[in-house]
Image (tube, helix red, strand yellow):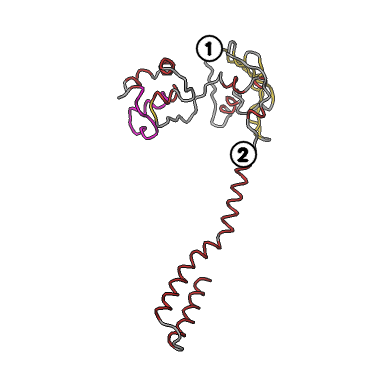
Amino acid sequence: MLGTLIALGVLWVGARQVLETHTMDGGILITFMVLVMRLLQPIKQLSQAPTTAQQSLAAAERLFEVLDQPAETQTDRGTRVLDGLREGVAFDGVGFAYGDTPVLRDITFTARRGEVVALVGASGAGKSTLVDLIPRFIEPTTGRITLDGVDTRDLTLPSLRALTGIVSQDTVLFNDTVRANIAYGKADATEEDIVACAKAAAAHDFITALPNGYDTLVGETDRKSTHLNSSHRCISYAV
């Protein structure tokens, strides 16, 4: 509205000078009007600068809240190193709550080495939460979790997580070769290591059947292919 009033005011004054007092040429008035109209949009954008600045400040506050959080290595109280799993994992009266909302209560069981243990329950029952407690992505509110009788909180995070392998619910392949996807995270992996990993995931046979074997390019763009799409999850398991 302000911009329209300014344009009308300039037109009214300029028209009088052109038609009544003859102190201005019509071409000059038109040129000036064009310049005024082109200035209105930058002025409007300038008026929105405080709003944009407030949004940026709010985003910066959230960003710095994350950056100011201490790293896991700084808060890790573990001092012991475990170089292998010999007996198993035991949950002893474990409980966990998100704030004041309890999710797990008095969970007690033992998963021995070599056993296959399945956690079955409705969505939101706490299955993922329970598994996240083992590598200490989150800490139990009550009770303790032990590996070979050692409380996981007494273990250093690197040694604890070196003993765990995680297959996410959302499988992801990087836009690279099958070989590079399997060796991701272990730059010094040999060809024998990669093949052994693929065989352990029952992926070796169909990988060798791909057009270029382990050098076949895979990724999200290749999931449109029926053959690669059916192999996607198994390759991710091998990763």
Q: Residue at x 61, y 39 (%)?
A: 67
Q: Nearer the viewer, residue 151 or 174?
A: 174
Q: Which mark is residue 67?
A: 2
Q: Single out the mark in the foreground, 2 or 1.
A: 2
Q: Amino acid at mark 1?
A: Gly
Residue 2 is covered by the magenta coloring: no
Residue 169: percent from left, percent from top: 49, 29
Up the image or down, 68 lies above or below 233; here it is: below
Residue 56: percent from left, percent from top: 58, 51
Q: Are marks 2 and 1 in contact (CB under 8 Å)?
A: no
Up the image or down, 74 lies above or below 79; here it is: below
Overall secondary structure of the magenta stretch? helix
Q: Residue at x 60, y 16 (%)?
A: 89
User: Which quarter of the rendering shows the C terminus?
Assistant: top left
Q: How many marks?
A: 2
Q: Is residue 5 left or right of residue 217?
A: right
Q: Earlier in the sequence, mark 2 or mark 1?
A: 2
Residue 66: percent from left, percent from top: 61, 39
Q: Amino acid at mark 2?
A: Leu
- Residue topped by disc 1: 114
Q: Which mark is residue 127?
A: none
CA gap, disc 2 to disc 1? Answer: 40 Å
Residue 96: percent from left, percent from top: 65, 28
Q: Residue at x 45, y 19 (%)?
A: 189
Residue range corresponding to the magenta coloring = 214-235
Residue 216 is covered by the magenta coloring: yes
Helix, strand, or loop for circle 1?
loop
Q: Is residue 213 left or right of residue 184?
A: left
Task: Residue 155: name its quadrant.
Answer: top right
Up the image or down, 215 lies above or below 87; here it is: below
Please rate how many residues cluster around mark 1, counting C-alpha atoms within 10 Å: few if below 14, some from 14 to 19, many from 20: few
